[in-house]
């Protein structure tokens, strides 16, 4: 019996976020959820605020670095999908990055690569 996790067929490797990383909607200036996982091209968030499907958002979150510091990441995103979570008032939301600075993309790439628990399936 195999204990291998299912193969991730997404194009960009993702890294699960183990810390409670708040995500802020910069237009509302309020926390709208917490980060679930992130790649160079998008992210999964557990939303605690109502979001509109197919809407554009300007989000910000602190990326926890190995040395204990955090680096703020600013992203323009498109909400691709959302579905209710098990907890009342919360939903899972999948975003595609529309704008991400070169510096922040490189930081995300390094951070995702630090995750030695997972081997990236693809670098596409």
Image (tube, grey):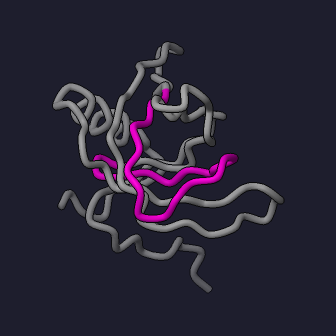
Q: Is residue 80 above or below residue 105?
A: below
Instruction: Determine the image quadrant of residue 87.
Output: bottom right
Report x, y in % for residue 109.
27, 39
Please indicate whether residue 36 sits to the left or right of residue 113 in the image.
right
Asked whether residue 65 is drawn in magenta, I would say no
Image quarter in which the N terminus is found = bottom right
Report x, y in % for residue 53.
48, 64
Please state which of residues 21 and 80 is positioned toward the viewer in this rendering. 80
Report x, y in % for residue 42.
36, 52
Total labels: the figure holds 0
Q: Residue at x 66, y 60 (%)?
A: 91
Asked whether residue 53 is drawn in magenta, I would say yes
Q: Residue at x 62, y 69 (%)?
A: 83
Please indicate whether residue 83 sits to the left or right of residue 113 in the image.
right
Please indicate whether residue 84 sits to the left or right of residue 94 in the image.
right
Q: Residue at x 43, y 44 (%)?
A: 116
Q: Is residue 37 above or below residue 88?
A: above
Q: Residue furthest bottom?
A: 1
Tell me where the magenta segment starts and ends, as one range. 39-61
Please state which of residues 26 and 90 is positioned toward the viewer in this rendering. 26
Instruction: Determine the image quadrant of residue 115.
Output: top left
């Amino acid at each position: 019996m195999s204990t291998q996790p299912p193969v991730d067929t997404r194009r960009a490797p993702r890294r699960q976020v183990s810390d409670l990383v708040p995500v802020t909607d910069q237009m509302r200036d309020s926390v709208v959820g917490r980060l679930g996982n992130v790649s160079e091209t998008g992210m999964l968030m557990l939303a605690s605020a109502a979001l509109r499907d197919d809407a554009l958002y300007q989000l910000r979150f602190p990326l926890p670095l190995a040395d204990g510091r955090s680096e703020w990441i600013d992203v323009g995103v498109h909400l691709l999908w959302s579905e209710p979570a098990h907890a009342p008032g919360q939903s899972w939301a999948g975003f595609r990055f529309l704008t991400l600075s070169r510096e922040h993309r490189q930081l995300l790439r390094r951070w995702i690569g630090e995750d030695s628990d997972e081997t990236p399936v693809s670098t596409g």
